[in-house]
Amino acid sequence: MSDVLLFLPETVCLVMALLLFLAPVLSLRYRTAWAMALVAGIAAVTACLWTLHLEGEPFFPGIYRVDFFSQLVKTFLALGYLLAVVISREPRTVRETARLELPLFQLLATVGMMMLASATEILTLYIAMELSAYPIYVVVALHRNRRLSSESSTKYMVQGMVASAVSLYGMSFLFGVFSSTYFSAIGEQLNAVAANPLFWLGLLLMLSGFFFKLAVFPFHFWAPDIYQAGPHQVVTFIATASKVAAIAVLCRLVSLAMQFDPNDFDSFRSVLMWMSVAAMTLGNLAALRQKDLKRLLGYSAVAHGGYVLIGLQALSGLGLTAALFYAMGYFAISYVCFLVVCEVGRDEDLVTIQSMSGLYKRSPLLAATLLVGLLGLIGLPPTVGFIGKWFLFSAAMDQGQFFLVLVAAVNAAVALYYYLLVIRQAYLVEPESPEPIQLSLPVAIAAGATAGLVLAMGVFPGVFWDRAALAVAALLG
């Protein structure tokens, strides 16, 4: 019975996925499928909270670990699915004949991401990575404008498959070095391979698939295209849940290298550091020229992936905690921004910065929600974006990396310009259409709750930091 409870969140999601599978089979109305998906999201969040403090291995020893780290990540993944469903009541940018499949594939992707959070064996990790990826490839291609989405979705799938192949290649190197696919066995032999370049090469190659999910340089090319051309609700799911899953797996994999003497992983740290610098700089500079709001947020995601790498490359408990805390904060910030995009762009295939004109008159709640989200992306108090960057910078300064913190601070100042352009458009420009935007009750609640979370995590970070610290302590064991 205990093993059943350990696997409860994934079981709930799989059972609800089977029920959602019946929606297209029985040709149910989309509203019915949406209500079923809403119940599935609530059930998944409840199951994650119920198992939050459980520990154990529900399957064969060494392949799947349930602890506070995995369950905290799964809670945010389930919440990401639920919030994505809330704004999908009328997914007008999704092809009408394919709307019934939308919640099903998103739920299957959520199951894969949950498995990523608990996988402690290379093949299990790879299968979970593929399970989380293929449903996303499908829903990205469901845009009602085939001409708009066909090229970008194809590029996304091809690039994703290449990243997956590179990761598998790196996994084969690790198997060759350690003669085992279990993380526990790898950990026991680490000191014997500290000077073996194949280990470091294999680890970097294996990380590639998850760098792709996080959209950091040089695996970022898909992000602006998919953010721009994907259905609004699908991109929201990618920008929130998918990022949390990627950061969680990177934390688990990077923690393998932390068992060495610091002098043994200087080269590995340098690679991550320069990837961080490149991602922050490229993302922010490219965003300066964007007129499409979703494409701008895509390049912003590249830059924020670089910020996360600041914590990861510190290769310390403080750095991993800061990265996980930032993942939780960025989850809320991204959702807030994309909720506004979904509501303003209900009938628009492309949502530009100009689409935000006079938003404060058309919907004061959406304008305030957008303001909170953009202030979070900028990194201004009292939002979690400020305190999250503070923690990441502190982790780097703890390692004496003043140069990296300086580069990150300059990039944050550059980003201020293009975020303020959006705020100006929403508050200082008259609306092109005087028609007010009416919000449904679930969307209004989601907007208020997530905007409140962005502020709460910034004003009272200790509550969330303590949870992140407990999760990392469980990870490092």
Image (cartoon, helix red, strand yellow):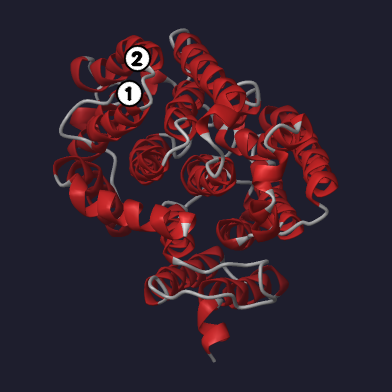
Neighbor class of circle 2 (other Cα within 10 Å; few <14, some 14-19, many 20+) is some
Task: Check disc 2 and give the amino acid type.
Answer: Phe
Comes first in the chain, label 1 or label 2: 1
**Residue that label 1 marks:** 397
Quarter of the image for residue 123 reads bottom right
Quarter of the image for residue 409 reads top left
Q: Is residue 28 above or below residue 103?
A: below
Q: List x then y, in percent, for residue 178.
A: 78, 50
Q: List x then y, in percent, for residue 95.
A: 64, 46
Query: Is 115 in front, or is 194?
Result: 194
Residue 142 shows up from this direction:
no
- Marks 2 and 1: in contact by CB < 8 Å? yes
Q: Which mark is residue 402?
A: 2
Secondary structure under tag 2 reads helix
Q: CA distance from mark 1 to mark 2?
A: 6 Å
Task: Check disc 1 and give the amino acid type.
Answer: Met
Q: List x then y, in percent, for residue 473.
A: 40, 56
Query: Is 412 in front, or is 271?
Result: 271
